[in-house]
Image (cartoon, rainbow, N blue to C red):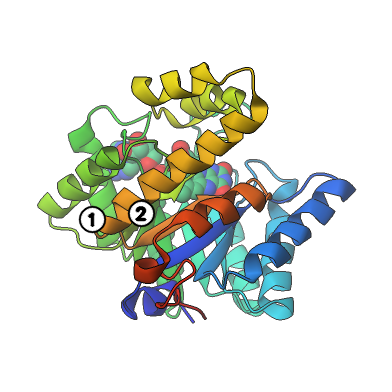
Amino acid sequence: PTIRELLARGGRSFSFEFLPPKSEQGVRNLWRAVRELESLQPTFVSVTYGAGGGTRDTTVDIVERIATETTLTPVAHFTAVNHSQAELRNLIGRFASVGVRNILALRGDPPGDPMGEWVKHPDGIEYADELVRMIRSYGDFCVGVAAFPYKHPRSRTIEDDTRHFVAKCRAGADYAITQMFFRAEDYFRLRDRVAAAGCDIPIIPGIMPVTRLSTIERSEQLSGAPFPDEVRKRFEAVADDPEAVRRLGVQHAAEVCQELLDQDAPGIHFITFNKSTATREVYGLLDGDRYGASGSVPPMTA
Ligand code: FAD
């Protein structure tokens, strides 16, 4: 099924994001996490796409294995970095040939320094909306795009960011997944400004449970998502107890998810880093009776 169809069934979408592994041990960790999270019957799982070669083939291989060997619906992340239009078309064909019809279309960042100068491939594309159009021109693909609660770091203003996001919707995006964020209200602001600009595609919040203090700083750098002071203080109070930090991270992520779901977010997309424990714990803390984490309303399944 396509993500468009799954989202249209009503209910909430629960999904998990994986990374292509870089070592043998990494391969084992990935498949263990996939199997452990499969039992939660997520709506879909997604696999990221490497910035410059290397992991790119692996993304295709992993989504193919997920499609053929598990009960899960895979979404392939796909970026335009360093690809000519002919290569992009070729790769879209490969996704189709391994039975993957769901693609998250991204412009991507320059390899090496993500904030370095963006140089388009001479025969490539400049912005994600062109990739959305290209994939949709094949007919039966379902296309997701990225959304940024704090605006994309390259966008001059929030207004520009919103305009460019809406251009991706107009190009044919079916839904969006957000960059990680740590306060529900930041998601609601994004949703409100996109709706005010006349765009109503489902925007799925991207959530990463903080399990170590060092991830707070790293995720702030990567995402531009400011970590709220009051929550940082709660973490700092237990800084010398790693297990307490982890528990607090799970608790905090669950609180944010609950607030999002209570105010009609279409679901939650968990960034897992190929580990299942924190994600399963957060999921288990959600109000099962209402959202199917463990109660009467099952989450949507393929
Ligand atoms: P775009 O939508 O093209 O936007 C890029 C910038 O250009 C923005 O500032 C936008 O406002 C601006 N812009 C857009 N159109 C125009 C226009 N017409 N004129 C002027 N400016 C314009 N990266 C990876 O390498 N692999 C992954 O697997 C991956 N997965 C991701 C998953 C999610 C959920 C998210 C949120 C991000 C992911 N990224 C991934 C990172 C992403 O590739 C980068 O954030 C990238 O810099 C932006 O991609 P985009 O698709 O949003 O680009």
Tell me the quarter of the picture where residue 190 sits.
top left
Q: Which disc number belongs to residue 77?
A: none
Q: Nearer the viewer, residue 46 or 28?
A: 28
Q: Is residue 173 above or below residue 111?
A: below
Query: Residue 99, position in %: x, y?
Result: 62, 79
- Left or right: 241, with 290 as reference point: right
Answer yes or no: disc 2 within 8 Å of ligand 1: yes
On the question of residue 191 being in view, the answer is yes
* Label 2 crowd bin: few (<14), some (14–19), many (20+), radius 10 Å: many
Q: SS of the residue at dot 1?
A: loop
N-terminal of the pair, mark 1 or mark 2, is: 2
Residue type (three-letter) at the residue carrying disc 1: Gln
Callout 2 secondary element: helix
Q: CA distance from mark 1 to mark 2?
A: 29 Å
State whether residue 295 is above or below residue 219.
below
14 left or right, relative to 41: left
Question: Which residue does the numbered mark 2 point to in the structure image?
Answer: 129
Residue 115 visible from this viewpoint:
no
Image spot of residue 248 (x, y percent): 51, 34
